[in-house]
Image: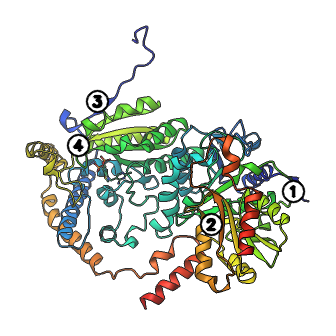
Amino acid sequence: MMAANQVYEGAIKRIEVMAQDEESSLEKDQLHEIYRQMILARKFDEKAFKLQRRGEVSTYAPHKGQEASQIGAVFAMNDDDWMVPSFRETAAYIARGAPLDKLFQRWMGDARGQKDLENDLPVAIPVGTQNLHAVGIGMAMSFDEEEKAVVGFTGDGSTSEGDFHEALNFSGVFDAHSVIVVQNNQYAISMPVEKQTNAETIAQKALAYGIEGIQVDGNDVLAVIEAMNEALEKARNGEPVLLEAVTYRLEDHTTSDDSTRYRDEQEVEEWKEHDPILRLKDYLKENDQWDESLEEYEEKAEEKINEAANKAMEVEDPEMEEMFEYVYKEMPDLLKKDKKELEEVEK
Amino acid sequence: MPEKMNIVEAINAALHDELENDEDVLMYGEDVGEDGGVFRATKDLQEEFGEKRCFSSPLAESGIVGTAIGMSLYGKRPVPEIQFSGFSYLAFHQIKEHAARFRTRTRGTKEVPLTVRAPYGGGINALEHHCESPESYFAHAQGLHVVIPSNPQDAYSLLRKSIQLDDPVVFLEPKQTYRAFKEEVERDPDAAELESSKVIEEGKDVTLVAWGAMVPVAEEAAETIDADVEIIDLRTIYPTDFDTVIESVKKTGRCAIVHEAPKTGGFGAEIAARINEQAILHLEAPVERIAAPDVPYPLYSLEDYYMPDENQVKKGLENVLEF
Ligand SMILES: Cc1ncc(C[n+]2csc(CCOP(=O)(O)OP(=O)(O)O)c2C)c(N)n1
């Protein structure tokens, strides 16, 4: 009951599965597939780090610790749904089926690696701005009355950007078919989420825009899937959702960052106990769904990753023309002249 | 059958005809729906085409352009309106770093066929930020087309061409001349081409380059002096048709450029530099720029000093001719 002098009352639901000892409705082979994807993504991360140390990759943004949020979200999606990622969504791309060698190639600074998947946008570097693209896609789906949805990923730091708020506002006004997933990994580079916003949760920001906000344990892949199933069903009906996945970045912000400067080891150790991969493994064991083949998969995943990385490293650097090729549909005369001049100097 | 229209009517007609021509075309922005936009450029379109094709949106420039990018990636052909170009900077990031880059970013697999319309320029006794000429900022954003018509026929045809283009366009409309004069307009998109400037008056003594609301000023100034002035309407700021200008300068040996934006870094600087690179041996005099001073656009009691007028253009032409 609302008090007489109140004008609005809202609440945010939190979804947990593993911590509640609830059982998942997923089949055993689905659970195994999710586990394998998480392992593959983790191995990619480790490899990319090594390649950066060897100078093959210039900067890499690791997703270690966030595999459940990303892979869980993608698992709930259909192929014809759209994905609008930010820059830390390599695990999500892997789960969407992006070729591993192409992902490496992009991190190696070769744009040919980012030729996108049909329904997925490429990496977006300017923080928060991509949320508007997700909502625009969701608006178009709504206008066309299609039973599809778009899933956008963004970070806790990005929720301070104007574009994040404009995106939520437009989504509500135009019944966009969008789910904006905020991976609250506790830090925006060195800025802890407590200093980023005075709000207790990020999910509650949805209430101001008249859309649904859900918080989920982002290290519990089964909870993420459950929350996403609910969110996607709403979004397909023109009810956009803001979903906050509470998680933790176990690594540095990027390979150029040193997170020991701004967070203490004990905190990291505590979160390591909630590592989403360990949690799924424990869950599977406790529910008699574990299979030794999953242990063996680690080696296979490593092989796959090494193969992909080698393939990417073998690719010749792009030709200079690449730079001019896709600026306009038809190359304007001005660019043709620029290109010719550069060719002559480089000869 | 040609009809008599002013510029804003020609824009309205172009929007109407594109809505009819392609069902993916839609338009939105602040007050664009019921109200038809504050300048009535979208007048009656909602009534005829419905609320999904022409509608008012929340007051948020980045939101308007950013969501339009999403829609265009999904296959729509949005034509968002920014109420005044002085507020386009709130969407500048979306226009420059996203709309202009998606083709490159996706190696040509995705495109953003978006036309951002905005009234621009001064001369209407308006408030602060209602008078800016931001064409140079957008011209420096590779991947964009920047178009400025100066008359009803070009406004009609260039807007239709812009909407049909599979690349993003910033379409700046000279609001001072929105209703200044009427002209016969052929409802034919091919009556003007993008990426091409136009010699609107031939002459052999001096080349005068102008765009937008400065074109009528250039024409009037040219009439007051005793010389044969070749006037070029640049029409498309970027990708620029420098060739027409260079050809003309090679013929006349002299050039003056007039624009509303402040001189430093204004697009006139780029034109002068190209002439320097490609036609310096043909020059009889330094290229003259007639532009606004390097001050913020003033409140309107001073705007007559700020905007280049017939006298300033005349003086500029004399400088070049008498050098
Ligand atoms: C608009 C913008 N400002 C600044 C940056 C530099 N920058 C890159 S990542 C980052 C922090 C982002 O934090 P968050 O949104 O929480 O995402 P996370 O890195 O935690 O995944 C910053 C400031 C940027 N990329 N874009």
Near-viewer residue (A328 or B270): B270
The answer to whether marks 4 and 1 mark residues whose Cβ atoms lie closer than 8 Å is no
Viewer-nearest of labels 4 and 3? 3
**Dot label at residue B268:** 2
Separation of residues labelled 2 and 1 (CA atoms)? 28 Å
Secondary structure of the residue carrying numbered label 3: loop
Near-viewer residue (A345 or B273): B273
Instruction: Tell me the quarter of the picture where residue B130 sits.
Output: top right
What residue sits right under mark 4 in the picture? A220
Disc 3 chain ID: A
Separation of residues labelled 4 and 3 (CA atoms)? 21 Å
Q: Is residue A267 above or below residue A327?
A: above
Separation of residues labelled 3 and 2 (CA atoms)? 53 Å
The amino acid beneath tag 3 is Glu
Cβ of mark 2 under 8 A from ligand 1: no
Question: x, y percentage for residue B164?
Answer: 68, 62
Instruction: Tell me the quarter of the picture where residue B301 sits.
Output: top right
Question: x, y percentage for residue B33?
Answer: 68, 39
The answer to whether marks 4 and 3 mark residues whose Cβ atoms lie closer than 8 Å is no
What residue sits right under mark 3 in the picture? A200
Question: x, y percentage for residue A208?
Answer: 43, 29
The amino acid beneath tag 1 is Glu
Q: The C terminus of chain A appears in which quarter of the rendering?
A: bottom left
Q: Residues within 10 Å of mark 4 (few under 14, many from 20)?
A: many
**Dot label at residue B37:** none
Near-viewer residue (A42 or B60): B60
What residue sits right under mark 1 in the picture? B183
Secondary structure of the residue carrying numbered label 4: loop
Viewer-nearest of labels 1 and 3? 1
Viewer-nearest of labels 4 and 1? 1
